[in-house]
Amino acid sequence: MLSTRIEKKATVWVSLEGNHCELIACSIYLCRASNKSFFFSVNSIGSVCPSSTIRCNQLRRALAYKLQTQPGAKAEITALGTKAASGLTLATLFALSAPTLKAHMPEGTWLASDGGPFTIHPWPPVTKLFLSAASLTDLHRPTDKISLTQYAALTVTGFIFSQYGLLVTPINYPLTAVNILLFGSSAWHLGRKVKADFL
């Protein structure tokens, strides 16, 4: 019985690999926002950053399980790691050069504004869009591969943070829209999971 539960959990983790990568990226990004005191209060640092450590551990366990059970998984994981390292390198270069690039933009344009691409303002909606996309691309995922706790957390997150896009300056409508999308897509999977397991 215990081995069946462990195998079932590992299967859920393996099926959510991409989602965990996106959650890790989102958590790291939110920590950066917290440290800058731009969008989140300092109190959220403690609640967001440790979650990325937990997600890294879950991802590590999922990859270890995949290596043990699937032949040829090492090449797939190596290719994924290379792509992730390339993306992280590009993102780091962009983040480091953003203040300089913003200073060279024409005054009064969107590129030089506080809501432009060289600030933190437009990027949280992009990272949250990946969370929604993971749910939307697989609307009929088998319910045994849906994590109740993960989708409960995503649903509550989408609900709570829908209002915060309207509270920051400048108002961030894309952040509000993507949180509404996250709430809807996560609530769909959460409802399916609750219906299958408890009703």
Image (cartoon, rainbow, N blue to C red):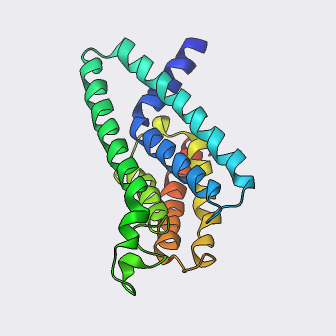
Give the tally of numbered discs: 0
The residue closer to the viewer here, 109 or 155, is 109
Say if 45 sits above or below 117 in the image. above
Q: Nearer the viewer, residue 162 or 3?
A: 162
Q: Is residue 179 above or below residue 32?
A: below
Percent x, y of residue 148: 59, 42
Residue 118 location, x and y as percent? 41, 67
* Image point (46%, 67%), residue name: 119
Identify the residue at image location x=42%, y=51%: 135
Please tell me which residue is depicted at 50% across the width and 45% down the height of the picture.
23
Q: Residue furthest bottom?
A: 108
Left or right of 168, for residue 108:
left
Residue 75 placement: quadrant: top left
Q: Taking 186 as reference, is 85 above or below it? A: above
Q: Furthest residue to the right? A: 43
Left/right of residue 36 with respect to residue 186 in the rendered view: right
Q: Is residue 87 above or below residue 32?
A: above
Task: Give the image location of residue 38, x and y in percent.
Answer: 61, 65
- Say whether residue 195 is visible: no
Quarter of the N terminus within the rendering: top right
Comparing 108 with 115, the one in front is 108
Tell me, yes or no, if residue 50 can be seen here. Answer: yes
Q: Nearer the viewer, residue 194 or 169?
A: 169
Instruction: Please provide percent x and percent y for residue 191.
Output: 56, 53
